[in-house]
Image (cartoon, rainbow, N blue to C red):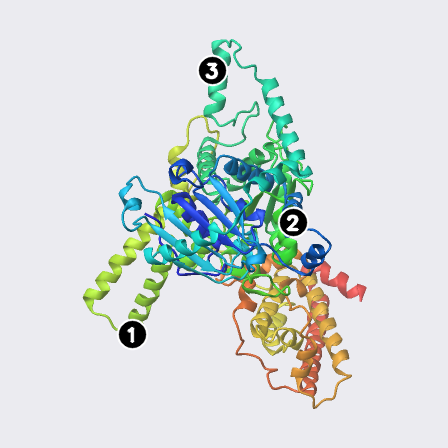
Amino acid sequence: MLPSLDALVDNSNNTLEDVYKTVVPECEEIRIATGYFYLSGFNLFKEDLENLRNPEELEHAPFRILMGRKTDQRTVDEVSEGQTLREQFEQEVKEDVEELNNAQIERLDRLRDFIAEGLVDVRVRNPDSGYFHAKGASFRGATDDPSLRNGDRDQRGAVTIVGSSNFSQSGHRHNVELNLTSQNGSDAEAFEEWYDNQWANGEEFSEEIINIIEETDRYQQWKEQQDEDDDEVEDEVDIGTYLEPFEMYKLLAYDELNGNVSIRDSPLYYFQTLGYESAKTKLSQYDGCIISDSVGLGKSFIGSELLYDYREQGDRCLLIVPANLTDQWRDLLQDATDEDGDPFFGLEVDGKHLQVMSISKFQNLTYDEVNALDDRFNVVLIDEAHRFRNHGKWNPNPVDDDDYTGTRRHANARLLRKNTMIMLTATPINNSATDLKNLIGLFTDENELMNKASLKFSAFDDYIDLAAERKRIAAGKEEATEQEQRQMTEKLKRHSDEISEILNEVMVLRTRKHVKETLTDQDDFDMSFKPPELNKEQYSLPPAYQPIYRMLPDVMDALHLPHITIKNPQAGGTLKALYKLNLLKRLESSTYAFVQSVQTLHESERSLLGFLDGLPDDEDIDVLRTMGDDAAETTLEDFVEGEEAAEDVEQTLEEFGFDSGALQADGGDADDELADATVGEVKTYIHEDLTLLAYFLSRFIGRVARDSGSIADMEVRAGTVAR
């Protein structure tokens, strides 16, 4: 039975590539009609043609492709010069082959084999008979019951797809297309009757494709390299040679361990090795997993051991980590040693084969820059992956750097979904099941979970919707009988169990208690789970600081900060609060850091005032916003000192349940005091801020330096002297 499909496929929420990957492996007969058959389109099928019927039984190939060809002014010119349409078409196919990479050439070699074996047949509709622009397909499900296909009516499972997508990688994956699907037998019969009539009028082209493939320089180079690799393997293994029993044992052990053998001693403890092995199993199944052991159990060591394996295989690895952990990760991977001086991992972080990048830098990359990373790397490890829990997605073929919905951080991560994805987080869920759904969706989807584990990814949405409904009932916004509420609770329990099964499938999640039970005598590891002892400490502020701290809340509240609101009308109020939070964080760091931040604020507002002095006072401030439409919006890095400081503020926000990456995605801001302001009024706000800052700084620096006594803050004194 063929799987159920969405009625409409437009490559946004689901792609035609995903539909084909789901349907093709279950089919015994396939018909494809396409305006043009780009060779990249066949990459999408991989090895999933095992169920195709025997061509001798069918008396034709079970997989047929009927295509048109491109017609443009170039074609017209070349035909007028004596080159036939067929010759021009052959030339276009040759050019396609020359542009393919090694992975695509390997798929192309399979296409050549399928054609040679009679499984795939290709025909061309000559434009002389009318430009063939049809795009559709029909699929018939595999069956062991001949009566289903040989009766008066074909009763095999059927899928029919008709729409705008060509048989190409972009048509199946990237372009915004419109394709309708049907699983109605009558629709399939109508399409097949039309298709078979068109097929009968098509010209054979399979033999030419084989010849073109084999004659291109690109394919011949790839084939020579394959032959050389095969020769090397043959040289290494002399088949038929007698092996001593111990040598045979080593070969069998190597095969059983999937080649994962090394003279190197792993730095992992036994309980970490269990987590590492579990992660490897999940990675082999889904090409991604979430490692979510409790804090202090060595997730970074498990992740590093996985990276070591991938680097041994020649894969290029990208780490995306908090800015304040970039040096720590480089040291762990490259320089950290055990007590004997032997490196734990000894990997070279060279930026080419292994690169460490901060989350803040990654989230600000453009669409093209992230796609370039996607081409460079095979494996991605994300530390503190819970920071990617808020959904985001680039629009198809984005027109600029802001052409995305949701958070840019998550949108960028989605572009790396083709890579192996390792995610480390001790807090995979913050507020709701939506967080988990968004994280898991970075490396798998509903089709893969259903096909490989018979699990419904929709359990997340069902749970989320039902929980929201119950919350409305509890708040008195909706009504429900006691029986309905009991049924709702039962459904929530069922969906919760389904989600737990999904987590077991894709996540390594162990508590400290569980790990303590798995410790062995060989683990030289002292693990104590005693709760920390809290000691109440009494302290009072020195006299020099007390008036300043009493004044501080009023000063923070009075600041207008128009330079932030002007650049960010959508989230200005939130960013202003964030700015003030950062000032307090800088004061917590040191008085000198606080003074430096205030100075930066002072300079920003004076710069804005200088710009406004050239505008009429009665001009509406929206004019200034219009002038600044092309300017980049403010981010954390615009008003904090350094990348680590930005990460520090983000961490603080997340502790309170906020995500700074989602601020600009949240829509309008009700607290915009500049909504109806004029240029003159904004100037007044700036003057008030500058006066307040000058007064506060004079009180702050002067009083601390004058009345500090024995608790002098040398940083403030140094700053005062420097001025």
**Farthest left residue?**
483
Residue 163: % across, % down: 47, 60
Please name the residue that numbered disc 3 is placed on: 249
Amino acid type, callout 3: Tyr
Residue 293: % across, % down: 45, 43
Amino acid type, callout 1: Gly
- In this rendering, the count of numbered labels is 3
**Farthest bottom residue?**
618
Badge number at residue 476: 1
Residue 496: % across, % down: 32, 53
Select label 3 or label 2 by which is in front.
Answer: 2
User: Could you classify mark 1 by the number of other residues whose Cα lies within 10 Å: few (under 14), some (14-19), or many (20 or more)?
Assistant: few
Badge number at residue 92: 2
What kind of element bears circle 3?
helix
Task: Please tell me in which quadrant of the rendered image residue 703 appears.
Answer: bottom right
Mark 1 or 3 closer to N-term?
3
* Camera-side residue of 495 and 217: 217
Residue 651 visible at all: no
What kind of element bears circle 1?
loop
Kindly report the distance in space between the C-alpha atoms of the residues bearing marks 3 and 2.
53 Å
